[in-house]
Image: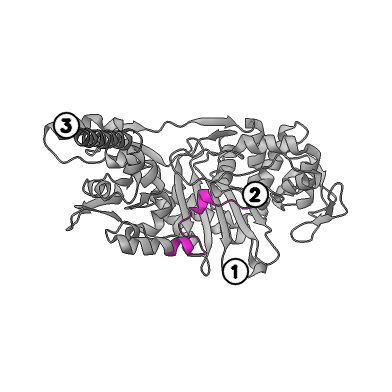
Amino acid sequence: MNKPIRVVSVFCLVLFLALLVNASYLMYVRADSLSDDPRNRRIITATFSRERGAILVGKEAIARSVPSDDKYKFQRTYSQPYKYAPITGYFSWYGQTGVESSQNSVLAGDDSRLFVTRLVDMLSNSDPKGGNVQLATNAAAQDAAWDGLEGLPGDAQGAVVALEPTTGRVLAMASTPTFDPNKLASHDFGAVADLSKELNADPREPLINRAIGTTLPPGSTFKLVTAAAAIESGNYDADSQVPGGYRFKLPQSSTTVGNYDGGNCGGRRITLTQALQVSCNVTFMSLANELGVDAMAEQAEAFGFNDTSLEDLGGQAESLYPRDLDPPQTALSGIGQSSVTATPLQMAMVAAAIANDGDVMRPYVVDEVRAANLSVLDRTDPQSISKAISSTTAEELTTMMVATVDSGTATPAQIPGVQVAGKTGTAQSTADRPPYAWFVSFAPADNPQVAVAVLVQSSDTSRSEIGGGRLGGPIAKAVMEAVINQ
């Protein structure tokens, strides 16, 4: 073989080997990343050309795919977009969020539980269909939660979470401001890209599900955790005498902190029940200081702090109780201030655990996975994740919370003929912005069916009128009534 032919042969061999290496690299190394790349139009066309499964609340499909008159064959639609967007998320050419993301393999028809369905479709030469996802949501509770947030004055920011205490079912999860997932599911990809940029740049952060993605100081609702730690120590019960008075001097400091209303909580010595009824800051700072950071942290973590629990919905933020608080910070943590932060879901879990004899149930939004013919393929089993408090402590706290609704700061949550347990919270923020309003509750107190947490992050309410009971109480009441009256 002469030299020119040998050079050409070697060059062709090198090109062949390079092609082989590149093909192997693409198929075995980069296959997943290329499939997930939003710029991969082939994947987009294939995904949009398959009938994606529905997301159901009761018998209503709140998200489904309908035939379209373009090359993508199917258009994703949302029947109640703003109300359910924090749960459903969106299905778009550049990605998914919410249940659309966490249950994507089911909805797309790729989940292993749909193997038989895919096999039948192939043998019958039918177009493949995705599976359906049945949510645990209670439609009436979701309506009440959404209506409550919408009824807040001005361009409000807030969230509501309702749980079934004995199972952890998420009966309602609403967040405002929100967005229209129909617009993000459009086949006009240029318009979708523009809208996405607009939503991400919006200072109101409408794409965030505040129920699980926003952590703020829980304020006086955290006094339930402090009270739980005090009772669990064995030194206190609902009738124990505790410090009251006008002000508490932070340890190792010259700073004193008073009560929210500037009063003395009813005297220098009051019962623990009365302290919760009037939300006495002095009492719960004193208790946190006495218990110490380790006992407080252990109790908070038993309720779910410093961890995440919701496994079938992405976007969770971790509620925090730092273990490195100094004595002044530890005292302030007893009233839900200092560096303590919580999501509405976390505070709903605290209320639900008290309602459930101290057992913390893992929250879940997906109740069932179904095939396209609606046959049930899988069902979520309730799971206890911790024993936060004893049943005796839960009973004591319930008694105290009922007294708080009957004749304390939580009276706006009263339901005629129903015993309600509740606690208000007004968490201080920076000096240049209003406080955050919180409310947690459950009902009926003697046979709990629903536990609720409400956060009003901001609204057009004058600073002097902001309070957990005034803003959050009526919303929690409406959600509890929606569940109880069904």
Residue at 38% in and 63% down: 195
Task: Identify residue type, mark 1.
Answer: Thr
- Counting residues from the N terminus, which is met first, the one under dot 1 or under dot 3? 3
Q: Are marks 1 and 2 in contact (CB under 8 Å)?
A: no
Q: Which residue is mark 3?
A: 120
Label the magenta part by its dominant secondary structure.
loop
The answer to which of 13 and 259 lies nearer the viewer is 13
Query: What's the magenta region?
Result: 198-218
On screen, residue 251 versus residue 136, left or right, reads: right
Q: Which residue is mark 2?
A: 221
Q: Position of residue 97 (x, y in %)?
A: 40, 49
Mark 2 element type: helix
Q: How is the image coloured?
A: one colour
Image label count: 3
Residue at 58% in and 59% down: 457
Q: CA distance from mark 1 to mark 2?
A: 20 Å
Magenta segment: does it hold 204? Answer: yes
Task: Identify residue type, mark 2.
Answer: Thr
